[in-house]
Image (cartoon, rainbow, N blue to C red):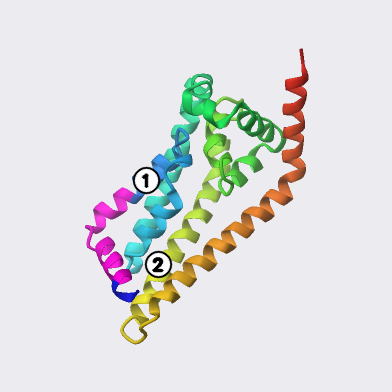
Amino acid sequence: MNDILSWILDTVRGVDPALRVLLVGLGMLFETSILIGLIVPGDTIVIVGSTAITTWQEYAALLVAVIVGALAGESIGFGLGHFFGPRIRVSRLGRKLGEHNWMRAQNYLERRGGIAVFISRFLPVLHALIPLTVGMSAMRYRKFLAWTAPACIIWAVAYVSVGWLAAGSYRQLSSQLHYAGYFFVAIIAVFLVIVLLVKKLIERGEARHMGHADAANEDETRKP
């Protein structure tokens, strides 16, 4: 396992650092704009990119790239929602998401305001829909940015740090332990389990508010 993992990590690290940072930043930009977050796994891109970090300078550069990429992507989503929101909503991809999810995002935003923007960064589907939905709402961009920026920073620090920690631990142990690769896998697995549990706790804590959104959806569908 060590040989395969070392080859993968060396391949990632073999990419020019500037290019690697640029690619990760662009990946985050696409992940957080125009529903691409439902297709491109931003968390995977960041974790893979962060395994090549070897210095604090590289850590800081990648962290900035992830944060800037995420904020740029969400800003693009906001702008697209403001100018083309209804068209995107009825597009082929928008229809695949289902009107229920669009209404859920819209009503959740109306119910929770800025808190919905912050929390949506950590929830599936909603994190792709909220920027577009906010763009179609009366919320100003400055307020949207004030709520989404802290969430993007927290998300970026968590994912970049765990990739760096897992790869760094493996490199220190690989020459001493034949099963060092399992430590790498274990760190990533534990992190993903924690992320899943946190998402479940957030969803449970917000269920009361999301329930209002679902109820509003049902009321809308019952109207003649």
Q: Tag count in the figure?
A: 2
Q: Is residue 69 visible?
A: yes
Query: Picture quarter containing residue 39?
Result: top left
| Circle 1 residue | 27
Give, as a single range, the part of the protein colored magenta.
Answer: 4-23
Q: Earlier in the sequence, mark 2 or mark 1?
A: 1
Badge 1: residue crowd in 10 Å (few <14, some 14–19, many ≥20): many
Say what amino acid the circle numbered 2 marks.
Trp
Q: Position of residue 201 (x, y in %)?
A: 68, 55
- Residue 19 forms part of the magenta stretch: yes
Q: Position of residue 209 (x, y in %)?
A: 74, 40
Asked if 10 appears above or below 80 in the picture, the reply is below
Q: Position of residue 166 (x, y in %)?
A: 42, 70
Q: CA distance from mark 2 to mark 1?
A: 18 Å
Quadrant for the C terminus in the image: top right
Q: Residue at x 53, y 65 (%)?
A: 191
- Residue 12 forms part of the magenta stretch: yes
Asked if 21 appears above or below 182 in the picture, the reply is above
**For residue 49, side relative to residue 219 (left or right):** left
User: Among all residues in the image, which is located at the extreme top?
Assistant: 224
| Circle 2 residue | 164
Asked if 181 appears above or below 31 in the picture, the reply is below
Q: Nearer the viewer, residue 217 or 33?
A: 217
Q: Is residue 140 visible?
A: no
